[in-house]
Amino acid sequence: MSSPASHGDAAAGLSEPLLANGGGGDAGFHHDGALAAVVVATSAHGGGSSGKDKKGAVKAKDDGYWVDVPQESTAVDDLESGGGGDRPLLFSTKKVKATLLYPYRVLILVRLVAVILFIAWRIKHNNSDLPKFRPIKRTPNLAALRQHYDDLPGDGGSLLPGIDVFVTTADPISEPVLYTMNCVLSILATDYPVDRLTCYLTDDSGSLVLYEALVEAVSFATLWVPFCRKHSVEPRAPESYFQLEGMIYNGRSPGEFMNDYRYVQREYEEFKMRLEMLPSTIKERSDVYNSMKARDGHHAGIVKIAQNHPSCKPEVDHHQQASNTTTPLSFDGVDTSLPMVAYVSREKTPGHEHNKKAGNLNAQLRASALLSNAPFTINFDCDHYINNSQALRAAMCFMLDAREGDNTGFVQFPQRFENVDPTDRYGNHNRVFFDGAMYALNGLQGPTYLGTGCMFRRLALYGVDPPRWRTEEDIPVDSSKYEENVTAEASRFGNSTLFLDSVSKALKQERSTTPPSLDDTFLAELERVVTCSFDKGTDWGKGVGYIYDIATEDIVTGFRIHGHGWRSMYCTMEHDAFCGIAPINLTERLHQIVRWSGGSLEMFFSHNNPFIGGRRIQPLQRVSYLNMTIYPVTSVFILTYALSPVMWLIPDEVYIQRPFTRYVMYLLVIIVMIHMIGWLEIKWAGVTWLDYWRNEQFFMIGSTSAYPAAVLHMAVNLLTKKGIHFRFRWVPMLIPTMVVLICNVGAIGVALGKTAIYIGTWTAAKKMHAALGLLFNIWIMFLLYPFALAIMGRWAKRPVILVVLLPVIFVLVALLYVGLHILLAGVVKF
């Protein structure tokens, strides 16, 4: 999503679709003198939009390197449909072709042997590639899901289970309100039964601006959601949708589309203006808002219902009554009902540890248990939105599948970003990780939790074992037995009778599609479960919910769930499920990296260490978690190697041990193996060479800046027990990278100077060593190229300046070295 300023104040400058339906009619529409610019073609089939828009929407990927895995139907009684039938297989599995996979495995093994033999490289090139032995891709079968859970005989409704959707935001200043509301709107318009979907906005600031913005979003949703359903709009976040070019129309009413499009676009611009005016209008009329700054963000718990629960039957043709406005749009035969929407802000008071995002999500988990208690939850950062309206159904294909569905604790989607520059200078897409490492983990116990775009089974978050490990005592059979154990349960989940009752219902897989009565007693209990002291003395943040006291609560939460024996699934879709905003500059990107790497080291030095934690984690899965926690330490060795060109600056009279031939051979074998393995990964993962190269470049930048900073902070933490603080000035963090860059620039210049002076006296061996050293320097310079552009500031938009500037610097350093050599030689002779 772009910033609001990019759209201007009037609708006149906005692009409008030009309908091409193959049969004459107007070629286009003029609006305030502007010719419509967006081209729409009528498609004969349903589904999401295809092709590629200006922001790089992903086209269908080539699966030429993948083959289907033969599936065996598993007979499992379908309890939801009354038993007797077999549960369907709701996703297909693919593996890498043997002609590519087996050479890939052989190379990994050969590389491991080389690493073992060459002990000096063992730490830097550890066995982190071993978990990539069995990359697996799984594709949801949406048609089968619809056939078995939606297209039922008669008017039986849908058998799909409920989902509670959490949108987390810290405050309306650091995270723009428009982004948050677009996330909410995309959720409300997603293709899922409205009576089984609840959207929760979890505001950690208790801001009146965000609550009133949510009310405005719900009001606009009464127009936006039916429009999306009527015309099969993709994506269903309006900010992104109205920026598209060359859309494919998949709706049922092409003749009405132009009218509807222009009307909804105008309404959206007015909606954006209302959001922009909220802070000023609230300040004018709210003493509470004006006093919030003085209270430093502390506030009581707040739970508000912004949109009531819909009836079980869809509402048709009631848009005007819902919005209390007149509209020229016709929604005949379109479901205009909305899911339930709630605003939740946990209590924040001085003197209490609020546990950041994990504490916010745990408070939301408890509040949602009382209001809707859906068996599945999914959380989004507020700068992400649903890019494919079928995404929630896709996750259900894994949760309800007859094979591993009952033992699947969570389904993780890849993270995609839309604001990345075309060259992806700072490696924000990170496709080597999302399309390589995650496929590899998918063949083991499953991917780890990545913080957003992840659907959980509520029981897995509650710390309950999966069915394959669960004993009969874990599930209360009758209410009397539950009452006997309520004290013990309260010590684990907190002392709330209503919440404990919701846990019991979750264990029994009971859920009502109608909300509870919101009487005073219920509302008081609802506000009680979001107080900052509720989880004190309980298992919340340890064995229940999202994990506390660590910067990377996502990885540790996934580790805990895997440790109980649950597996996870990685869900990729042809049209990306979700999309978000990535850091746009080097400062933000490095701050993100240092937080992740610091949290990883925290995990290694905690009771969640992969060596000792997670009693049911598979061996190779444990190795992968180990690699996730110790990778920042490798930066110490990389930084040392990157500074080795300083040897060029040492006079020839000083003796330096040259590397042994065996050393060089091992080095070359390992480097060749690394890039051959990378080439094969590129093939089966579907990433491009540019993605691979950007990953290499940013790993070098991170290894000389963010990772050493994280290692330093961890060392300080272990010695002083003062914890890790990730908010610090970014300039000191970049000093090592600057030193590496300067050393290599200087080393290349000195190498050229030495070559000019000694080329006639060097032996063949010395010339070979000089060539290898110079090649190493140049390689480091290529890896640090994005960093060099970043420190150029506004001149970075013209990379040609750097291409010209560096050779000039090399020549100047060489001339300086030659001049100093002649000068010093003359002084010595004299």
Image (cartoon, rainbow, N blue to C red):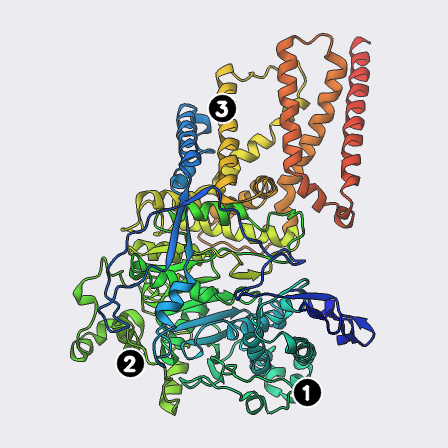
| Upstream in sequence: badge 3 or badge 2 | 2
CB within 8 Å, label 3 to label 2? no
Q: Residues within 10 Å of mark 1 (few under 14, many from 20)?
A: few
Q: Nearer the viewer, residue 381 or 827?
A: 381
Give the percent coordinates (x, y) of residue 348. Answer: 48, 75
The amino acid beneath tag 1 is Glu
Task: Kindly give the residue lying farthest to the front in the view shown.
Answer: 23
Quadrant location of residue 803?
top right
Label 2 near label 1: C-beta < 8 Å?
Answer: no
Q: What separation in Å lies between label 1 and label 2 (alpha carbons)?
A: 42 Å
In the displayed structure image, the side of residue 403 where residue 724 appears, left or right:
right
Residue drawn at 80 percent across, 35 percent down: 804
Residue sitting nearer the eye, 686 or 248: 248
Position of residue 826 measured from the top left corner of the image (x, y, whole percent): 82, 12
Distance in Å between CA atoms under marks 3 and 2:
64 Å
- Asked if 573 appears above or below 483 in the picture, the reply is above
Q: Earlier in the sequence, mark 1 or mark 3?
A: 1
- Which residue in the protein does label 3 denote? 669
Which residue is tagged 1?
284
- Using a 10 Å C-alpha cutoff, classify the residue at mark 2 as few (fewer than 14 neighbours), some (14 to 19) or many (20 or more): few
Left/right placement of residue 177 relative to residue 616 reads right
- What label does residue 666 carry, if any? none
Q: Which numbered disc flags the more N-terminal residue, 1 or 2?
A: 1
Image x and y of residue 580, in percent: 57, 61
Please determine whether, in this image, residue 2 is positioned above or below residue 682: below
The local secondary structure at tag 3 comes to helix
Residue ID for mark 2: 497
Q: Residue 359, percent across and down?
A: 43, 67
